[in-house]
Amino acid sequence: MSLSTREADSLAIVPLRELTTHGERTVRTSIPTLDAFFGGLRPGNVTLLDSSDRMLFDLTHILCVNGVSTLGQDVVWVDGGNSVNPYELGRICRRFGLDRTEVLDSISVARAFTAYQLVSLIDERLEEEVRRTGAGMVIVSCLPDMFQDKEMRWSESYQLIRRCVERLRDLSRGRGVAALITNYGLMKILQRKSLKNLLYGMADDIVRIENASRCLRITLPNRQETMYYHAVPHNQTTLEEFMRR
């Protein structure tokens, strides 16, 4: 699987050239309520997006598009869970008035089909692809999924995941890229305390999304902050979002 593989006709997103208080560009979700709470993905940092709700996939695609738009650089996406949807990327581009072809041409996608392929892509080929494309953002989606194979010893799985996360952290800090790791199904996959400690301990920022009573509970564990969010369909907006348009 080549990191230079381009996903079918693709994507573009709304230019969000927001600055932090330090003058540093951040990649945001385009959802004002969430952006005000979380802030966004920061260059040089690793963010873990951990969710038991499928909103995870919506946010990952939006952040991918916004990564291209905000940073003005390519995005490299290593997919460990068959989660990349080029049609969704295209819809996001149209929603934000971006040139779909231009955005999609700025996204390199590599899919792994085994845990060992995923490790190889991250440990051996990712840095070279970031250098080749000049990418400003890296996504590794559904990182823990393939390491739950019953045929793999847990001790081996743990060490391989650790190697991947360390590589991403070094790459992020060394080249100043915004790195995003996602995990879907927190309660199922992170049952092993050692794995949760590993991922939570090595991420600079953590966003945890869980189902609550008819809404989503969004927590920032590192800041010990929580909010409740009522998601709306793509073709609707909250009053706050409508007023900002």
Image (cartoon, rainbow, N blue to C red):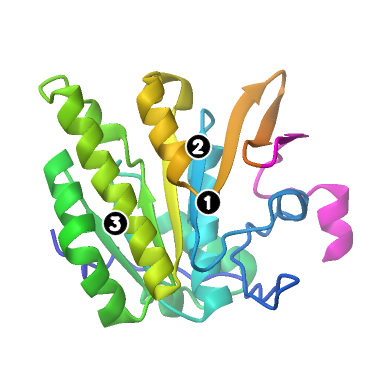
Would you call the spot at circle 2 few (<14 residues within 10 Å), some (14-19), or many (20 or more)? Answer: many
Residue 180 sits above or below residue 221 on the image: below
Q: Quadrant of residue 185?
A: top left
Tell me which residue sits at (43%, 31%) in the image.
197
Residue 139, position in %: x, y? 39, 57
Which one is closest to the eye, mark 2 or mark 1? Answer: 1
Would you call the spot at circle 3 few (<14 residues within 10 Å), some (14-19), or many (20 or more)? Answer: some
Q: CA distance from mark 3 to mark 2?
A: 19 Å
Q: CA distance from mark 1 to mark 3?
A: 14 Å
Q: Specify whether 130 is left or right of 10.
A: left
Residue 128 sits above or below residue 153 on the image: below
Which one is closest to the eye, mark 3 or mark 2? Answer: 3
Report the span colored magenta: 223-245
- Please say whether residue 201 is visible from this viewpoint: yes
Q: Is residue 77 magenta?
A: no
Residue 145, position in %: x, y? 29, 33
Q: Amino acid at mark 3?
A: Arg
Q: Is residue 229 magenta?
A: yes
Q: Which mark is residue 204?
A: 1
Q: Which residue is mark 2?
A: 50
Tell me which residue sits at (62%, 74%) in the image.
25
Tell me which residue sits at (51%, 78%) in the image.
99
Q: Which residue is mark 3?
A: 167
Tell me which residue sits at (30%, 41%) in the image.
81
- Kind of element beneath mark 2: strand
